[in-house]
Image: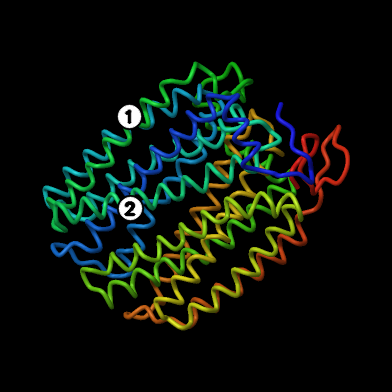
Amino acid sequence: MISESAHGTPGLRGFARSLRHSPGLGRLLAVRLTSQITDGVFQASLFGAILFNPERHSDPLAIAGGLAVLLLPYSVIGPFAGALLDHWDRRAVLMYANLLRAVLIGLVALSIASGAADTVVLIGALAVTGASRFVASGLSAGLPHVAHRDVIVATNALFTTLGAGMLAVGAGVAALLRALFGPDNLGSALTTLGGVVIALIAAGVAHGFARLALGPDHPDDPGSSAGHAVAVGMLHGVRAVAGSRTVSAALSAIGAHRLVFGMNTLMLLVLSKHTGGGDGLASVGLVAGFTAGGALLAALVTPYSVERFGRRTTLVTALIIGAIAELALLSFQIAVICAAAFVLGLIGQTAKLCGDVAMQVDIADEVRGQVFSVQDAVFNIAYVGAVTVAALVVPYDGHSLGLPILGTVLYLVGAVVVRLMHTPHRAPGLTGDPHRISVNHRHN
């Protein structure tokens, strides 16, 4: 086991040592990167095909519908995915879910090329993101099996932040393919097919794991059928979350951020469509790039902040900074929006990293997948709900004064909730300050 002093260098040095001694860590990182490039290619090509396609026309409610299709499966299918990930071999789930994604992305591309209605395309996208749910939960639930506990914060920082960066890379790949093949139905279909190749690569990398290398070590609800595991899975996950104040506090922070981020996303898409027309996708890509940059910075800042100040202070401070950045959006200037996007990318990824660590450290392995499903429900229902509300109230040109003000209030409320809810959690056998990270401490 690799040791890092509570006052030493947390993070990347320890992670590098873990990588040398755990080949599975590098393989899981490769699965994550290729899987999220697939997501980036597919999501960007889908939005290009529907929102910025000269052969189709979309209004704010149609945009909200597209976002709902991309994300609601993470909440609807999440309970099933979490229960099965705690019941089945997670290595097999990663492999077959990526193979299924490749097939489904191909079918979506065919529907786009044929000029099928938006509803048909979005139903296909619903199936793709449902398969993606199993991949995302499997990666998070399996990480503690290949990462040393004392570098779990840094490992999460690297994995989730590089993963977010790979979404941006995937979007860039889609933009290049779109420029090559064109923005019409046929060009959009060919762009979408790029995701098929990368999903197959991800499946091949996952195949290299040994059976049960990613757990579960002790399946939840042993001896019962998969159907029974699904039936009781969400209940087990909710119960585990309710029993951990650290996890509940982290989910509150994630929920607040996703509400704000959902409103911002809809407002940005309407602004870009109104000001940029068919070229508005470039503005969206620019802001997304700054958001990814903020997430990348979170990989460096969060481990040190948690080490020095603890998870509670890190989360509260992040939400307060987010409130300030949200107010800056009232300028509606692209330079200011990009700067705010960078800060909000940092804030959102910081909350996500703290949440992942809480679930991986404070939750037992046999219900960890189900707890990640609860997080996904919070993560995506909050986002889609906020997008839908914003679509109903945003002006035609996207210049809404009320949405950034509401976002600021939500961040501040989230900070208060985290401050009150997140109390130090001490498990048996722990010594010292529970807010600090060391080989013998949980990350509170």
Foreground disc of the pair 1, 2: 2
Q: Which residue is mark 1?
A: 99
Q: Provide residue 218's location: percent of width, then percent of height.
A: 64, 20
Q: Which residue is mark 2?
A: 171
Number of residues whose C-alpha sits closer than 10 Å to that of mark 2, classed few (under 14), some (14–19) or many (20 or more): many
Number of residues whose C-alpha sits closer than 10 Å to that of mark 1, classed few (under 14), some (14–19) or many (20 or more): some
State left or right for residue 180 relative to residue 326. left
| Identity, as a three-letter code, of the amino acid under mark 2 | Ala
Along the viewing direction, whichever of 232 and 291 lies nearer the viewer: 291
Q: Provide residue 283's location: percent of width, then percent of height.
A: 32, 68
On residue 10, which mark appears?
Answer: none
| Identity, as a three-letter code, of the amino acid under mark 1 | Leu
Residue in the picture at 54% in, 29% down: 25
Q: Secondary structure at mark 2?
A: helix
In this view, 21 is above or below 113? above
Q: Provide residue 430's location: percent of width, then percent of height.
A: 85, 36
Residue in the picture at 21% in, 69% down: 278
